[in-house]
Amino acid sequence: MTLFQKYRTVIFLIGVALILAILWALFLKDKWLSVSTRTVEIHSLSTMKRFHFKKHSSQGSVHGLELEVAGTSDRTLLFFLGEADTLFNRSVTIKKGLVDFSFTGDWYTDDCFILLPSEPGAEVDLKISYRFLSTK
């Protein structure tokens, strides 16, 4: 039995670890770590809320969006998501109670608009966290 045959599993694992480290350093680190998540908070819906989210100035072409809504609401809420201030092409219903909603999907514009219609008297405590996924 040769030394290689004796330690082939260890050599294989070291090789895989080196390949992953190189891939991380060359391609993945910038994509995953350079873009921090931004957050807005909502404590009242007595008036309609509009949010305009933009990619970071250091980001390249946008190819995806991660959006998370967390908190509490005493009413079922409807909000609209769109690529322009006047074009809301997705609607999301959030059930009352403990809110834990997430969206990850294709997105090809540098902006995201969210519209939450007014709900006078609604007791809400929500955080909307988002980040655009892009090439560097």
Image: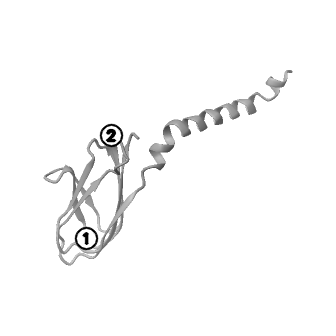
* Numbered label attached to residue 90: none
How many numbered marks have been drawn onto this rendered protein structure?
2
Asked whether, in this view, residue 34 is left or right of residue 80, the answer is right
* Quadrant including the N terminus: top right
Residue count near mark 1 (Cα–Cα under 10 Å), binned few <14, some 14–19, many ≥20:
some
Task: Give the colour scheme shown.
Answer: one colour
Residue at the spot of label 2: 61
- The amino acid sitting under disc 2 is Ser
Query: Up-down: is 46 above or below 61?
Result: below
Closer to viewer: mark 1 or mark 2: 2
Q: Is residue 26 left or right of residue 129?
A: right
Mark 1 is on which residue type? Arg
Residue picked out by circle 1:
75
Q: Residue furthest front?
A: 58
**Quadrant in the picture for residue 118:** bottom left
Per the image, label 1 sits on a secondary structure element best described as: loop
Front in this rendered view, residue 64 or 78 = 64
> Residue 23's x, y, as percent?
55, 35
Q: Is residue 28 above or below residue 124?
A: above
Q: Residue at x 35, y 51 (%)?
A: 56
Name the secondary structure under disc 2.
loop
Compare marks 1 and 2 and give the one earlier in the sequence: 2
Spatial separation of the CA atoms under disc 1 and disc 2: 37 Å
